[in-house]
Image: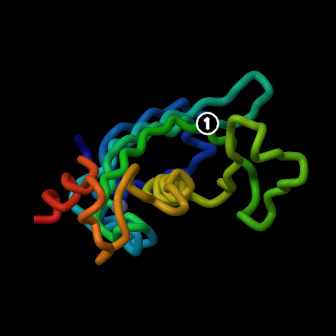
């Protein structure tokens, strides 16, 4: 599939024209994510579709899936984290600071509002949404602190797998 890493879009135009783009973005492109990724091999599958509704509101539908390798915050070993989301994003005029959040309850609405008066790189949008999806404190379902005496504990299949995957 085509790489979308260098694609810049004017989101309002994209929505008005009802465009659709599909492809991949290499994880190595996400510089802000690089702090939390143990491995930057692999890629994210991305599909973005624009549309305008009857109220003349502009929307992007952003669908992403992929697999990230994060560091478990308990045993400090690697853990694979699957991301899969399909987000509705409503486009707003103005920059990020100008977005009026006051009438937007983030917990209850099923869509996000993003500033879109400037064209931006699609990968920046994907990275923003990926960051929002990441667990605050990623941990294996069952594992032990590093250097802890594990002789009394059964190792979980996950931590065994994580150790194998490191090599
Ligand atoms: Zn762990």
Query: What residue lies at 24% left-to-right and 64% top-to-bottom?
Result: 151
Query: What residue lies at 39% left-to-right and 72% top-to-bottom?
Result: 31
List x then y, in percent, for residue 59.
Answer: 64, 36
Q: Quadrant of ligand 1?
A: bottom left
List x then y, in percent, for residue 141.
Answer: 40, 49
- Reading the image, the residue beneath label 1 is 88
| Quarter of the rendering occupied by the C terminus | bottom left
Which residue sits furthest left?
167
**Horizontal side, residue 164 vs residue 47: left or right:** left
Query: What residue lies at 16% left-to-right and 64% top-to-bottom?
Result: 166
Which residue sits furthest top?
54
| Quarter of the rendering occupied by the N terminus | top left
Query: What residue lies at 31% left-to-right and 53% top-to-bottom?
Result: 80
List x then y, in percent, for residue 153.
Answer: 30, 58
Q: Is residue 137 above or below residue 53?
A: below
**Horizontal side, residue 53 vs residue 47: left or right:** right
**Horizontal side, residue 138 vs residue 76: left or right:** right
Residue 136 makes an appearance in the image: yes
Which residue sits furthest front?
152
Instruction: For label 1, count other residues whose C-alpha is less than 10 Å away and answer few (under 14), some (14-19) or many (20+).
Output: some
Q: Is residue 13 above or below residue 28?
A: above
Residue 25 makes an appearance in the image: no
Which residue sits furthest bottom?
147
Q: Secondary structure at mark 1?
A: strand
Q: Disc count in the image?
A: 1
List x then y, in percent, for residue 91.
Answer: 68, 45
């Amino acid at each position: 599939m085509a790489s979308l890493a260098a694609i810049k879009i004017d989101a309002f135009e994209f929505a008005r024209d009802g465009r659709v783009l599909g492809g991949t973005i290499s994880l190595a492109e996400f510089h802000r994510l690089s702090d939390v990724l143990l491995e930057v091999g692999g890629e994210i599958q991305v599909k973005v579709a624009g549309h305008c509704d009857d109220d003349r509101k502009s929307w992007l539908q952003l669908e992403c899936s992929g697999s990230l390798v994060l560091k478990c915050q308990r045993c400090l070993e690697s853990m694979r984290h699957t991301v899969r989301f399909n987000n509705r994003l409503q486009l707003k005029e103005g920059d990020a600071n100008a977005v009026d959040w006051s009438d937007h309850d983030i917990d209850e609405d099923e869509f996000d509002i993003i500033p879109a008066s400037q064209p931006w790189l699609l990968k920046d949008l994907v990275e923003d949404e990926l960051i929002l999806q990441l667990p605050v404190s990623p941990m294996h379902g069952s594992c032990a602190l590093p250097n802890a005496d594990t002789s009394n504990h059964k190792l979980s299949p996950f931590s065994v797998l994580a150790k194998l995957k490191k090599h």
